[in-house]
Image: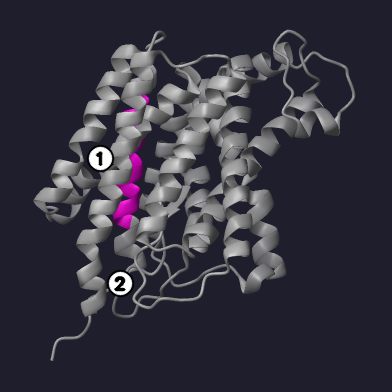
Protein backbone atom coordinates (compact mmCIF):
# COMPACT_ATOMS: atom_id res chain seq x y z
CA UNK A 1 0.00 0.00 0.00
CA UNK A 2 1.28 3.42 -0.88
CA UNK A 3 1.75 5.84 1.92
CA UNK A 4 0.80 9.53 1.82
CA UNK A 5 3.11 11.84 -0.10
CA UNK A 6 5.79 13.78 1.72
CA UNK A 7 4.78 17.19 2.97
CA UNK A 8 6.63 20.43 3.44
CA UNK A 9 6.76 20.98 7.16
CA UNK A 10 7.08 24.72 7.25
CA UNK A 11 6.84 27.77 5.08
CA UNK A 12 7.71 29.06 1.66
CA UNK A 13 10.57 31.58 1.83
CA UNK A 14 10.75 34.72 -0.43
CA UNK A 15 12.59 38.88 -0.87
CA UNK A 16 11.08 40.24 2.23
CA UNK A 17 11.57 36.33 4.07
CA UNK A 18 8.87 33.74 5.11
CA UNK A 19 5.95 34.55 2.91
CA UNK A 20 3.89 31.43 2.23
CA UNK A 21 2.66 28.38 4.11
CA UNK A 22 1.80 25.08 2.42
CA UNK A 23 -1.84 24.03 2.31
CA UNK A 24 -3.15 22.33 5.42
CA UNK A 25 -4.84 18.99 5.27
CA UNK A 26 -7.26 19.83 8.09
CA UNK A 27 -9.21 22.99 8.71
CA UNK A 28 -8.66 24.67 12.02
CA UNK A 29 -10.38 27.41 13.90
CA UNK A 30 -8.86 30.79 13.15
CA UNK A 31 -8.88 33.49 15.79
CA UNK A 32 -9.88 36.44 13.63
CA UNK A 33 -8.89 39.02 16.23
CA UNK A 34 -5.44 37.48 16.58
CA UNK A 35 -5.13 37.20 12.81
CA UNK A 36 -6.08 40.88 12.44
CA UNK A 37 -3.44 41.93 14.97
CA UNK A 38 -0.80 39.80 13.23
CA UNK A 39 -1.74 41.23 9.82
CA UNK A 40 -1.41 44.82 11.03
CA UNK A 41 1.96 44.09 12.63
CA UNK A 42 3.20 42.22 9.55
CA UNK A 43 2.33 45.05 7.18
CA UNK A 44 3.57 47.75 9.55
CA UNK A 45 6.94 46.07 10.13
CA UNK A 46 7.33 45.34 6.41
CA UNK A 47 6.60 48.92 5.36
CA UNK A 48 8.84 50.30 8.10
CA UNK A 49 11.72 48.13 6.94
CA UNK A 50 11.40 49.27 3.34
CA UNK A 51 11.24 52.95 4.32
CA UNK A 52 14.11 52.81 6.86
CA UNK A 53 16.21 50.82 4.41
CA UNK A 54 15.68 53.28 1.56
CA UNK A 55 16.50 56.27 3.79
CA UNK A 56 19.72 54.62 4.90
CA UNK A 57 20.76 53.85 1.33
CA UNK A 58 19.93 57.40 0.18
CA UNK A 59 22.24 58.83 2.83
CA UNK A 60 24.83 56.06 3.07
CA UNK A 61 25.23 54.33 -0.32
CA UNK A 62 27.08 51.23 0.80
CA UNK A 63 24.58 48.43 0.15
CA UNK A 64 26.88 45.51 0.92
CA UNK A 65 27.63 46.69 4.44
CA UNK A 66 24.04 47.81 4.98
CA UNK A 67 22.84 44.34 3.98
CA UNK A 68 25.36 42.69 6.28
CA UNK A 69 24.31 44.87 9.21
CA UNK A 70 20.68 43.83 8.69
CA UNK A 71 21.58 40.15 8.79
CA UNK A 72 23.69 40.76 11.90
CA UNK A 73 20.81 42.58 13.60
CA UNK A 74 18.88 39.32 13.61
CA UNK A 75 21.28 37.96 16.23
CA UNK A 76 19.80 40.39 18.77
CA UNK A 77 16.46 38.66 18.22
CA UNK A 78 17.48 35.04 17.60
CA UNK A 79 19.82 34.46 20.55
CA UNK A 80 17.47 35.68 23.33
CA UNK A 81 14.64 33.58 21.87
CA UNK A 82 16.78 30.42 21.84
CA UNK A 83 18.68 31.01 25.10
CA UNK A 84 15.58 31.93 27.11
CA UNK A 85 13.41 29.31 25.41
CA UNK A 86 10.80 31.88 24.42
CA UNK A 87 7.77 30.26 22.83
CA UNK A 88 9.24 26.86 23.63
CA UNK A 89 11.96 27.35 21.02
CA UNK A 90 15.59 26.30 21.31
CA UNK A 91 18.55 25.92 18.99
CA UNK A 92 17.45 23.29 16.44
CA UNK A 93 19.52 20.17 15.95
CA UNK A 94 19.62 17.45 13.35
CA UNK A 95 20.05 19.66 10.29
CA UNK A 96 22.61 19.04 7.56
CA UNK A 97 25.22 21.79 7.56
CA UNK A 98 25.88 21.50 3.82
CA UNK A 99 22.21 21.88 2.88
CA UNK A 100 21.60 24.67 5.39
CA UNK A 101 24.75 26.41 4.18
CA UNK A 102 23.48 26.31 0.61
CA UNK A 103 20.14 27.64 1.79
CA UNK A 104 21.96 30.39 3.71
CA UNK A 105 23.87 31.34 0.57
CA UNK A 106 20.66 31.72 -1.42
CA UNK A 107 19.11 33.71 1.43
CA UNK A 108 22.08 36.01 1.97
CA UNK A 109 22.82 36.67 -1.69
CA UNK A 110 19.12 37.22 -2.38
CA UNK A 111 18.93 39.74 0.45
CA UNK A 112 22.07 41.53 -0.79
CA UNK A 113 20.59 41.72 -4.29
CA UNK A 114 17.34 43.14 -2.91
CA UNK A 115 19.10 45.87 -0.93
CA UNK A 116 21.29 46.81 -3.90
CA UNK A 117 18.16 47.06 -6.07
CA UNK A 118 16.36 49.25 -3.52
CA UNK A 119 19.40 51.50 -3.31
CA UNK A 120 19.64 51.93 -7.08
CA UNK A 121 15.95 52.54 -7.79
CA UNK A 122 12.71 53.57 -6.15
CA UNK A 123 10.89 51.43 -3.58
CA UNK A 124 7.89 51.14 -5.91
CA UNK A 125 9.91 50.06 -8.95
CA UNK A 126 11.90 47.44 -7.02
CA UNK A 127 8.71 45.93 -5.61
CA UNK A 128 7.03 45.84 -9.02
CA UNK A 129 9.99 43.95 -10.48
CA UNK A 130 9.99 41.62 -7.49
CA UNK A 131 6.38 40.78 -8.30
CA UNK A 132 7.88 38.55 -11.00
CA UNK A 133 9.12 36.12 -8.35
CA UNK A 134 6.43 33.49 -9.15
CA UNK A 135 7.86 33.24 -12.67
CA UNK A 136 11.35 32.75 -11.24
CA UNK A 137 9.99 30.19 -8.75
CA UNK A 138 8.54 28.13 -11.59
CA UNK A 139 11.80 28.39 -13.52
CA UNK A 140 13.93 27.30 -10.55
CA UNK A 141 11.47 24.52 -9.74
CA UNK A 142 11.90 23.13 -13.24
CA UNK A 143 15.70 23.39 -13.05
CA UNK A 144 16.07 21.95 -9.55
CA UNK A 145 13.31 19.31 -9.48
CA UNK A 146 12.73 18.62 -13.22
CA UNK A 147 8.97 19.04 -12.67
CA UNK A 148 6.78 21.20 -14.90
CA UNK A 149 3.70 23.00 -13.57
CA UNK A 150 0.25 22.60 -15.18
CA UNK A 151 -0.48 24.64 -18.29
CA UNK A 152 -2.95 26.90 -16.45
CA UNK A 153 -0.26 27.92 -13.97
CA UNK A 154 2.15 28.73 -16.79
CA UNK A 155 -0.49 30.81 -18.60
CA UNK A 156 -1.23 32.66 -15.34
CA UNK A 157 2.37 33.91 -15.36
CA UNK A 158 1.83 35.95 -18.51
CA UNK A 159 0.15 38.97 -16.81
CA UNK A 160 3.02 39.16 -14.32
CA UNK A 161 5.64 39.27 -17.07
CA UNK A 162 3.62 41.78 -19.10
CA UNK A 163 3.01 44.04 -16.09
CA UNK A 164 6.68 44.15 -15.11
CA UNK A 165 7.63 45.02 -18.71
CA UNK A 166 5.04 47.83 -18.87
CA UNK A 167 6.08 49.26 -15.49
CA UNK A 168 9.77 49.07 -16.39
CA UNK A 169 9.25 51.01 -19.61
CA UNK A 170 7.25 53.62 -17.73
CA UNK A 171 9.76 54.17 -14.92
CA UNK A 172 11.05 57.78 -15.28
CA UNK A 173 14.20 56.94 -13.34
CA UNK A 174 14.74 53.48 -14.78
CA UNK A 175 17.87 51.91 -13.37
CA UNK A 176 19.41 48.95 -15.10
CA UNK A 177 21.17 48.08 -11.85
CA UNK A 178 17.88 48.11 -9.91
CA UNK A 179 16.20 45.89 -12.51
CA UNK A 180 19.05 43.36 -12.80
CA UNK A 181 19.51 42.96 -9.05
CA UNK A 182 15.76 42.79 -8.37
CA UNK A 183 15.45 39.98 -10.93
CA UNK A 184 18.56 38.34 -9.48
CA UNK A 185 16.99 38.39 -6.03
CA UNK A 186 13.86 36.81 -7.52
CA UNK A 187 15.92 33.92 -8.88
CA UNK A 188 17.91 33.51 -5.67
CA UNK A 189 14.84 33.61 -3.43
CA UNK A 190 13.07 31.20 -5.76
CA UNK A 191 16.01 28.79 -5.47
CA UNK A 192 15.93 29.26 -1.71
CA UNK A 193 12.22 28.49 -1.58
CA UNK A 194 12.60 25.34 -3.70
CA UNK A 195 15.52 24.06 -1.64
CA UNK A 196 13.76 24.95 1.64
CA UNK A 197 10.80 22.79 0.64
CA UNK A 198 13.10 19.86 -0.06
CA UNK A 199 14.88 20.29 3.29
CA UNK A 200 11.76 20.86 5.36
CA UNK A 201 9.88 17.92 3.88
CA UNK A 202 12.17 15.73 5.95
CA UNK A 203 13.27 12.23 5.11
CA UNK A 204 14.45 8.95 6.63
CA UNK A 205 16.48 9.70 9.73
CA UNK A 206 16.17 13.48 9.32
CA UNK A 207 14.51 15.79 11.79
CA UNK A 208 11.91 18.32 10.68
CA UNK A 209 12.58 21.92 11.64
CA UNK A 210 9.91 24.59 12.00
CA UNK A 211 9.79 27.47 9.57
CA UNK A 212 10.75 30.11 12.14
CA UNK A 213 13.86 28.20 13.15
CA UNK A 214 14.80 27.54 9.52
CA UNK A 215 14.67 31.29 8.94
CA UNK A 216 16.82 31.84 12.02
CA UNK A 217 19.42 29.34 10.80
CA UNK A 218 19.22 30.93 7.35
CA UNK A 219 20.10 34.27 8.86
CA UNK A 220 23.10 32.95 10.81
CA UNK A 221 24.51 30.99 7.88
CA UNK A 222 23.90 33.92 5.52
CA UNK A 223 25.73 36.28 7.88
CA UNK A 224 28.84 34.08 7.95
CA UNK A 225 28.78 33.32 4.22
CA UNK A 226 28.17 36.88 3.00
CA UNK A 227 30.54 38.70 5.39
CA UNK A 228 33.67 38.07 3.26
CA UNK A 229 31.95 39.48 0.17
CA UNK A 230 30.76 42.59 2.02
CA UNK A 231 34.20 43.31 3.44
CA UNK A 232 35.84 42.63 0.07
CA UNK A 233 33.49 45.05 -1.73
CA UNK A 234 33.32 47.87 0.82
CA UNK A 235 35.55 46.98 3.76
CA UNK A 236 38.38 49.19 2.54
CA UNK A 237 36.27 52.34 2.50
CA UNK A 238 33.58 51.76 5.10
CA UNK A 239 35.53 53.12 8.08
CA UNK A 240 36.32 56.42 6.37
CA UNK A 241 32.80 56.63 4.94
CA UNK A 242 31.29 56.09 8.39
CA UNK A 243 33.54 58.72 9.97
CA UNK A 244 32.74 61.19 7.18
CA UNK A 245 28.98 60.71 7.39
CA UNK A 246 28.41 60.39 11.15
CA UNK A 247 29.83 63.75 12.19
CA UNK A 248 26.78 64.94 14.11
CA UNK A 249 26.92 65.55 17.84
CA UNK A 250 23.22 65.53 18.68
CA UNK A 251 22.27 63.12 21.46
CA UNK A 252 20.38 59.93 20.65
CA UNK A 253 16.71 60.87 20.26
CA UNK A 254 14.50 57.81 20.71
CA UNK A 255 11.40 59.63 19.49
CA UNK A 256 13.11 60.65 16.25
CA UNK A 257 14.54 57.14 15.91
CA UNK A 258 11.15 55.45 16.21
CA UNK A 259 9.62 58.00 13.82
CA UNK A 260 12.21 57.04 11.21
CA UNK A 261 13.78 60.48 11.01
CA UNK A 262 17.02 60.59 9.03
CA UNK A 263 17.75 64.01 7.56
CA UNK A 264 20.27 63.77 4.73
CA UNK A 265 21.19 67.45 5.15
CA UNK A 266 21.99 67.26 8.85
CA UNK A 267 24.42 64.42 9.49
CA UNK A 268 23.61 62.17 12.45
CA UNK A 269 25.81 61.19 15.35
CA UNK A 270 27.50 57.76 15.23
CA UNK A 271 25.25 56.54 18.05
CA UNK A 272 22.05 57.63 16.30
CA UNK A 273 22.97 56.16 12.91
CA UNK A 274 24.10 52.86 14.46
CA UNK A 275 20.83 52.64 16.36
CA UNK A 276 18.93 53.54 13.18
CA UNK A 277 20.58 50.68 11.27
CA UNK A 278 19.91 48.28 14.15
CA UNK A 279 16.22 49.19 14.19
CA UNK A 280 16.05 48.71 10.43
CA UNK A 281 17.63 45.26 10.77
CA UNK A 282 15.22 44.27 13.51
CA UNK A 283 12.31 45.39 11.34
CA UNK A 284 13.69 43.15 8.61
CA UNK A 285 13.91 40.12 10.86
CA UNK A 286 10.67 40.57 12.79
CA UNK A 287 8.50 41.21 9.74
CA UNK A 288 9.67 37.86 8.36
CA UNK A 289 8.85 36.19 11.68
CA UNK A 290 5.46 37.88 11.70
CA UNK A 291 4.83 36.68 8.16
CA UNK A 292 5.29 33.13 9.42
CA UNK A 293 2.80 33.68 12.24
CA UNK A 294 0.25 35.34 9.96
CA UNK A 295 0.36 32.93 7.07
CA UNK A 296 0.36 29.90 9.33
CA UNK A 297 -3.27 30.84 10.05
CA UNK A 298 -4.34 31.28 6.42
CA UNK A 299 -5.43 28.94 3.67
CA UNK A 300 -3.83 29.26 0.19
CA UNK A 301 -6.40 31.83 -0.97
CA UNK A 302 -5.82 33.97 2.11
CA UNK A 303 -2.08 33.68 1.57
CA UNK A 304 -2.42 34.92 -2.01
CA UNK A 305 -4.54 37.91 -1.00
CA UNK A 306 -2.28 38.76 1.95
CA UNK A 307 0.91 38.74 -0.12
CA UNK A 308 -0.66 40.80 -2.90
CA UNK A 309 -2.06 43.45 -0.56
CA UNK A 310 1.30 43.64 1.24
CA UNK A 311 3.13 44.55 -1.95
CA UNK A 312 0.50 47.18 -2.83
CA UNK A 313 0.87 48.74 0.63
CA UNK A 314 4.66 48.95 0.25
CA UNK A 315 4.41 50.57 -3.19
CA UNK A 316 1.88 53.15 -2.00
CA UNK A 317 3.91 53.96 1.14
CA UNK A 318 7.10 54.34 -0.90
CA UNK A 319 5.54 56.73 -3.40
CA UNK A 320 4.10 58.89 -0.60
CA UNK A 321 7.11 59.05 1.72
CA UNK A 322 9.71 59.64 -1.01
CA UNK A 323 7.40 61.80 -3.17
CA UNK A 324 7.97 59.73 -6.31
CA UNK A 325 4.51 59.00 -7.70
CA UNK A 326 4.09 56.42 -10.42
CA UNK A 327 3.26 57.56 -13.94
CA UNK A 328 -0.07 56.54 -15.47
CA UNK A 329 1.67 53.81 -17.45
CA UNK A 330 3.54 52.77 -14.32
CA UNK A 331 0.26 52.43 -12.43
CA UNK A 332 -1.15 50.27 -15.23
CA UNK A 333 1.96 48.06 -15.31
CA UNK A 334 2.05 47.73 -11.53
CA UNK A 335 -1.64 46.85 -11.39
CA UNK A 336 -1.28 44.22 -14.11
CA UNK A 337 1.79 42.68 -12.48
CA UNK A 338 0.39 42.58 -8.95
CA UNK A 339 -3.00 41.43 -10.21
CA UNK A 340 -1.16 38.71 -12.10
CA UNK A 341 0.52 37.58 -8.87
CA UNK A 342 -2.91 37.24 -7.25
CA UNK A 343 -4.31 35.32 -10.23
CA UNK A 344 -1.31 32.99 -10.34
CA UNK A 345 -1.53 32.33 -6.59
CA UNK A 346 -5.26 31.54 -6.83
CA UNK A 347 -4.78 29.26 -9.84
CA UNK A 348 -1.98 27.42 -8.08
CA UNK A 349 -4.03 27.08 -4.89
CA UNK A 350 -6.97 25.71 -6.87
CA UNK A 351 -4.72 23.21 -8.65
CA UNK A 352 -3.29 21.92 -5.37
CA UNK A 353 -6.66 21.69 -3.57
CA UNK A 354 -7.67 18.22 -4.91
CA UNK A 355 -4.28 16.77 -3.88
CA UNK A 356 -4.76 18.06 -0.34
CA UNK A 357 -8.18 16.38 -0.13
CA UNK A 358 -6.89 13.03 -1.32
CA UNK A 359 -3.98 13.00 1.14
Task: Provide residue 107's location: percent of width, then percent of height.
Answer: 42, 45
Which residue is at the far right?
251
Indicate left or right for 49 with 215 as reference: right
Q: Is residue 248 visible?
A: yes
What SS does tag 1 mark?
helix
Task: Provide residue 296's location: percent of width, then percent of height.
Answer: 47, 64
Q: Nearer the viewer, residue 344 or 262?
A: 344
Indicate left or right for 327 with 263 as reference: left
Q: Nearer the viewer, residue 305 or 1?
A: 305
At x 37% / y 71%, what residue is drawn? 24
Q: Is residue 12 visible?
A: no
Lower position in the chain sequence, tag 1 or tag 2: 2
What SS does tag 2 mark?
loop
Task: Provide residue 153's location: percent of width, then percent of height.
Answer: 17, 49
Q: Main secondary structure of the magenta part?
A: helix
Residue 7's mark? 2
At x 84% / y 32%, what residue is drawn? 255
Can you say which quadrant of the picture contains the N terminus? bottom left
Q: Quadrant of residue 8?
A: bottom left
Disc 2: CA contacts within 10 A as few (<14), some (14-19) or many (>=20): some
Can you say which quadrant of the picture contains the C terminus? bottom left
Give yes or no for residue 224 being in the magenta stretch: no
Which residues make up the magenta segment? 180-195
Residue of label 1: 136
At x 84% / y 34%, what residue is drawn? 254
206, above or below 58, in the image = below
Amino acid sequence: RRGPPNRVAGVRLDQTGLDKMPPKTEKKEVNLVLLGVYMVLWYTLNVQYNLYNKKILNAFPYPYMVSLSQLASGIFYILPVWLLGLGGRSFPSGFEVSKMGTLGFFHGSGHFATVISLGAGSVAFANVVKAAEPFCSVLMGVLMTASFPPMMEMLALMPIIAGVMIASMAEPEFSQTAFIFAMSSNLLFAARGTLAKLIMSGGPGSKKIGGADVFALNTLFALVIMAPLAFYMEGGVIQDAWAKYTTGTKALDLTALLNGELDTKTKPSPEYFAAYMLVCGLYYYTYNEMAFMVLDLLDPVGQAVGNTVKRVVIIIAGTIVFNKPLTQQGIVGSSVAIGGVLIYSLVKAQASAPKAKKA
